[in-house]
């Protein structure tokens, strides 16, 4: 019997039946990134950022800075992913370098958060669809459940149909949002209403208050860009992962930045930034001002299409996390099996069950609030893994090398740490509970390890 070191994840590829299929191209990587990253955030966040920095130059600078953080992350993790492409997201990248328990914590929290995000997106989708489907009024949870089950059945058939669905829905999402932006820029600000509602003028803070406001605004922007790591979850399924993962992450971040800047420019063309500040749904206000009451229906359809792409992407990603953890001996071996279509079936069903349980118990918002702090913590841990791997294997073959290293990964790590400090100060209670969940994961890790032996 071979005894493996505690520090390295165990590879169990040979004993697991069924494998993922290497059939995906770069368009899928781009589609899953767009589907995952562009969600409700861009429709709600502009009002939050404008409330913090009610100045057009500072407002747009925050969106560019958020893309800068995502780009630093993509450039850094692209090197790790290209060296040893794996499906499963951040957990395999961390496990390869830092060992089993860090990989378990990252994978476990990532799975909970991704499944929780899927549940939340499905509920929001149902809330937007109900006015168009009056028969489902009061049945939002049922409609959200049906949406997730429909995508589960679709993905059950295999990754190829999941690929086609993701590319189609992400394309429709991008076209609908760019279309809204172009209409806004073409029409511009309509005539103001006869009796505008009074609103106190927002003022730009100065000095330390401005720095604090910028950090809070940047926190919102970073959340809105989150999802740029989507291609990392499919490293074993991309035909040329060493090339496609870095390329799709970098290109995807630039594409999303372009869409976000275009949309925000359109919002500003229709709504003065002083009125935008504090508006919980800037996109809805923009649509109503552009086309009147019909704007509500137009926007609802755009949001529904957008969120369909998000649900499919999140379910695809969530199912790959327990699959990868199983292949590394961190979860039972049964989760590491795929069907003939290349779907990790039990991992898919487990992710679906978790999402549906969160909907049924109405706890998805709580889960996301608790684990939001750990999103960036997981990124920070993976950036640390970059430095450790560089030190351990300085002469290893690297199909993609992080440009500007070590400055680029250092900036990514420092940005993550600064973000965590601000997040901890702004939401100390949830951050502490999230850290307690990490501590509680140790016995879960030991139990799952014994069962996988």
Image (tube, grey):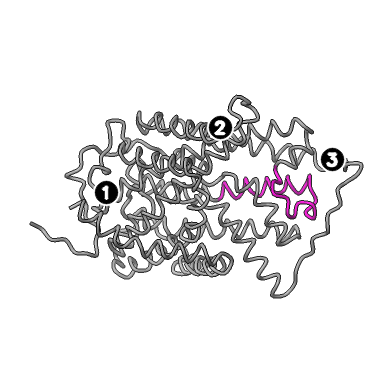
Q: Which residues are magenta?
A: 254-283
Compute the Cα span from label 3 to label 1. Answer: 56 Å
The secondary structure type at the circle numbered 3 is loop
Residue 139: which disc?
2
332 relative to 269 in the view: left or right: left
Compute the Cα span from label 2 to label 3. Answer: 37 Å
- Foreground residue, 331 or 188? 331
55 relative to 144 in the view: left or right: right
Most extreme residue toward the right is 194
Q: Are marks 3 and 1 in contact (CB under 8 Å)?
A: no
Q: Position of residue 188 (x, y in %)?
A: 80, 42
Q: Nearer the viewer, mark 2 or mark 3?
A: 2
Count up the numbered dots: 3
Q: Residue at x 77, y 54 (%)?
A: 273
**371 in magenta:** no
Residue placed under numbered mark 1 in the picture: 326
Most extreme residue toward the bottom is 208
Q: Residue at x 32, y 44 (%)?
A: 236
Q: Residue at x 76, y 60 (%)?
A: 55
Q: Quadrant of the N terminus?
A: bottom left
Note whether 293 is above or below 374 in the view shown: above
Compute the Cα span from label 1 to label 2. Answer: 36 Å
Residue placed under numbered mark 3 in the picture: 190
Q: Residues within 10 Å of mark 1 (few under 14, many from 20)?
A: many
Q: Nearer the viewer, mark 1 or mark 2?
A: 2
Earlier residue among tags 3 and 1: 3
Note whether 346 is above or below 37 in the view shown: above
Q: Position of residue 223 (x, y in %)?
A: 56, 55
Earlier residue among tags 2 and 3: 2
Q: Main secondary structure of the magenta part?
A: helix
């Amino acid at each position: 019997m071979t005894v493996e070191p505690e520090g390295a994840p165990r590879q169990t590829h040979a004993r697991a039946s069924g494998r993922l299929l290497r059939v995906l191209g770069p368009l899928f990587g781009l589609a899953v990134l767009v589907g995952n990253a562009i969600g409700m955030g861009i429709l709600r966040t502009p009002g939050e950022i404008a409330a913090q920095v009610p100045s057009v130059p500072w407002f747009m600078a925050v969106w560019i800075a958020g893309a800068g953080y995502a780009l630093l992350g993509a450039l850094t993790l692209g090197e790790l992913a290209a060296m040893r492409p794996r499906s499963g997201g951040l957990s395999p990248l961390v496990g390869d370098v830092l060992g089993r328990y860090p990989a378990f914590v990252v994978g476990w929290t990532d799975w909970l958060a991704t499944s929780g995000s899927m549940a939340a997106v499905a509920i929001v989708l149902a809330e937007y669809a109900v006015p168009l489907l009056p028969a489902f009024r009061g049945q939002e949870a049922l409609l959200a459940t049906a949406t997730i089950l429909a995508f589960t059945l679709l993905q059950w058939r295999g990754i190829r149909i999941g690929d086609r669905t993701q590319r189609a829905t992400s394309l429709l999402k991008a076209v609908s949002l760019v279309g809204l932006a172009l209409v806004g820029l073409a029409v511009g600000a309509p005539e103001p209403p006869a009796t505008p509602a009074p609103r106190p003028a927002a003022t730009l803070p100065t000095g330390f208050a401005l720095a604090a406001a910028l950090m809070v605004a940047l926190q919102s922007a970073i959340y809105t860009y989150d999802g740029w790591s989507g291609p990392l979850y499919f490293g074993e399924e991309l035909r040329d992962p060493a090339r496609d993962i870095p390329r799709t992450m970098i290109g995807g971040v630039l594409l999303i930045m372009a869409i976000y800047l275009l949309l925000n420019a359109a919002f500003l063309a229709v709504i003065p930034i002083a009125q935008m500040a504090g508006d919980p749904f800037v996109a809805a206000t923009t649509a109503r001002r552009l086309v009147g009451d019909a704007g509500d229906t137009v926007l609802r359809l755009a949001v529904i299409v957008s969120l369909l792409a998000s649900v499919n992407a999140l379910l695809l990603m969530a199912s790959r996390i327990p699959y990868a953890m199983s292949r590394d001996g961190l979860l039972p071996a049964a989760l590491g099996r795929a069907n003939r279509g290349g779907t990790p079936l039990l991992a898919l069903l487990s992710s679906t069950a978790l999402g549906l349980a969160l909907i049924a118990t109405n706890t998805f918002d709580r889960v996301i609030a608790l684990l939001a702090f750990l999103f960036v913590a997981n990124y920070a841990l993976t950036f640390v893994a970059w430095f450790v791997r560089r030190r351990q294997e300085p002469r290893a073959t690297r199909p993609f090398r992080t440009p500007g290293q070590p400055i680029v990964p250092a900036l990514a790590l420092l940005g993550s740490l600064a973000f965590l400090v601000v997040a901890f100060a702004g939401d100390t209670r949830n951050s502490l509970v999230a850290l307690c969940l990490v501590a509680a994961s140790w016995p879960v890790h030991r139990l799952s390890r014994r069962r996988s032996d």
